[in-house]
Image (cartoon, rainbow, N blue to C red):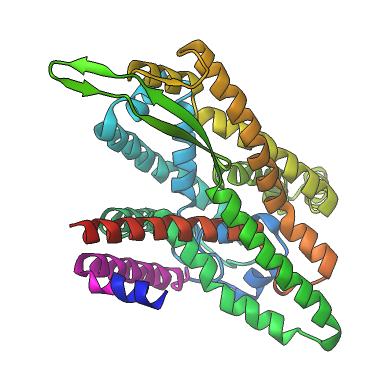
């Protein structure tokens, strides 16, 4: 391991990219430490600790809600814009053609639309978030001019983080947006560990030991499922063109078990916690009926059993949904047929598409169950071991492991390229 690290920093180009990524992440953390004016920190801390939606939003925004920074939305609006654009490919064939068939130029244009959509989404989310925080007493005495200024500043912070993420992806190593979320999650670890040690008592030692053992098992399971894939053997027939012979090789089509990544969890969170968010938004309305509805929504969806069951079901359903959006068996079967390939024992064309459809459904079942268990894991752990200071965040753990594995793969590929040269 030490020799590999030394080898990484001996390559000038790779060393420059890694240092550039670290510098950009440092700038991100500086932006996350600059608060908007007039924040009541004690009220903010109590609000985040007692609200599931904003606690999870804090994770996906990279921990920037801890002190209500100028980048409090993080990269959330950009992620939402990207998801919306991918869903729109199912409705508008031209968008699907642009994203899948026009190559790099089409993807760049598609990404530009996502960036443009980020701005109105950022303004909308900034407005809703600032209204809720103002009604909770976190931003007391905020004037309309200050409110409008904070909206512009917060939206600008999101655009700034989006720009940093794209710089990391272009000039560094790894995916910039994922790395910023990773940095936000990791930056919270020292605080969580300190709280766990501060609240530790001798009679909790068995629970902590079992908790750590389960944590190691879960990490191993996340790595295994993230890397797991079903290989479909594909053979290509020989073709003679002039004096040359093409094809005649055998390869495989990899179908990943976790084809959807963490996107289904984001979808499910947006829906399952939306009623609670509406309840928080309506809490300050001076109307008894609306206030009663607000209290009902907040109380009902804070029930751990209802929340856990609904969360698991939604993650399971959205895993199949997102896999169907991103994986088109018919298009893959047509491409294999156009290139003179075929799946062993299966006729090209429609029968190959049906075969791929059956296989992806079976593989996705394992991935959907895995994501559902990961999503509700913090609820199970906190209820079983009664450890509130340092709960095992399954979603955060999945993000961390996925980002680390993807970044290490890119670093390893660059090392191999350097050694080959």
Q: Quadrant of residue 51?
A: bottom right
Q: Which residues are magenta?
A: 9-35
Q: Quadrant of the N terminus?
A: bottom left
Q: What's the residue at 41%, 44% (across, down)?
A: 118
Looking at the image, residue 393 sits to the left or right of residue 382; the answer is left
14 within the magenta span: yes
Looking at the image, residue 245 sits to the left or right of residue 177; the answer is left
Looking at the image, residue 370 sits to the left or right of residue 61; the answer is right
State the count of labels.
0
Q: Position of residue 260 (x, y in %)?
A: 55, 40
Looking at the image, residue 416 sits to the left or right of residue 217; the answer is left
65 within the magenta span: no
Nearer to me, 255 or 145: 255
Q: Quadrant of the C terminus?
A: bottom left
Q: Quadrant of residue 315?
A: top right
Depicted 338 relative to depicted 300: above or below = above
């Amino acid at each position: 391991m030490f020799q590999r690290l030394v080898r990484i920093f001996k390559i000038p180009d790779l060393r420059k990219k890694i240092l550039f990524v670290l510098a950009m992440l440092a700038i991100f953390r500086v932006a996350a430490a600059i608060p908007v004016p007039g924040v009541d920190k004690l009220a903010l801390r109590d609000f985040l600790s007692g609200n599931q939606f904003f606690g999870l939003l804090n994770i996906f925004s990279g921990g920037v809600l801890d002190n209500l920074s100028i980048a409090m939305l993080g990269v959330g609006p950009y992620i939402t814009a990207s998801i919306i654009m991918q869903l729109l490919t199912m409705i508008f064939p031209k968008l699907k053609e642009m994203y899948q068939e026009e190559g790099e130029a089409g993807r760049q244009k598609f990404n530009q639309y996502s960036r443009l959509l980020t701005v109105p989404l950022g303004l909308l989310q900034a407005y809703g978030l600032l209204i809720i925080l103002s009604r909770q007493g976190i931003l007391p005495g905020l004037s309309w001019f200050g409110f409008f200024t904070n909206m512009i500043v917060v939206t600008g912070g999101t655009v700034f983080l989006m720009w940093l993420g794209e710089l990391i992806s272009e000039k560094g190593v790894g995916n910039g947006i994922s790395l910023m979320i990773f940095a936000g999650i990791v930056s919270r670890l020292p605080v969580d560990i300190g709280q766990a040690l501060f609240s530790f008592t001798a009679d909790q030692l068995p629970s902590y030991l079992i908790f750590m053992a389960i944590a190691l098992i879960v990490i191993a399971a996340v790595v295994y499922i993230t890397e797991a894939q079903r290989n479909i053997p594909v053979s290509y027939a020989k073709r003679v063109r002039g004096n040359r012979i093409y094809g005649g090789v055998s390869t495989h089509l990899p179908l990943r078990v976790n084809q959807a990544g963490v996107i289904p969890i984001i979808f499910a969170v947006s829906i399952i916690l939306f009623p609670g968010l509406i309840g928080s938004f309506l809490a300050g309305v001076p109307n008894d009926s609306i206030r009663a509805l607000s209290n009902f929504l907040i109380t009902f969806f804070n029930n751990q059993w209802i929340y856990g069951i609904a969360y698991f079901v939604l993650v399971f359903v959205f895993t199949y949904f997102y896999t169907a959006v991103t994986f088109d068996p018919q298009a893959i079967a047509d491409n294999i047929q156009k290139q003179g390939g075929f799946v062993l024992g299966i006729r090209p064309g429609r029968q190959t598409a049906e075969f791929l459809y059956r296989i992806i459904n079976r593989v996705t079942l394992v991935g959907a169950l895995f994501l559902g268990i990961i999503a509700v894991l913090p609820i199970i752990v906190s209820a079983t071991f009664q450890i509130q200071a340092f709960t095992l965040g399954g979603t955060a753990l999945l993000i961390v492991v996925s980002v680390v594995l993807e970044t290490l793969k890119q670093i390893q590929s660059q090392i191999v390229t350097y050694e080959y040269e």
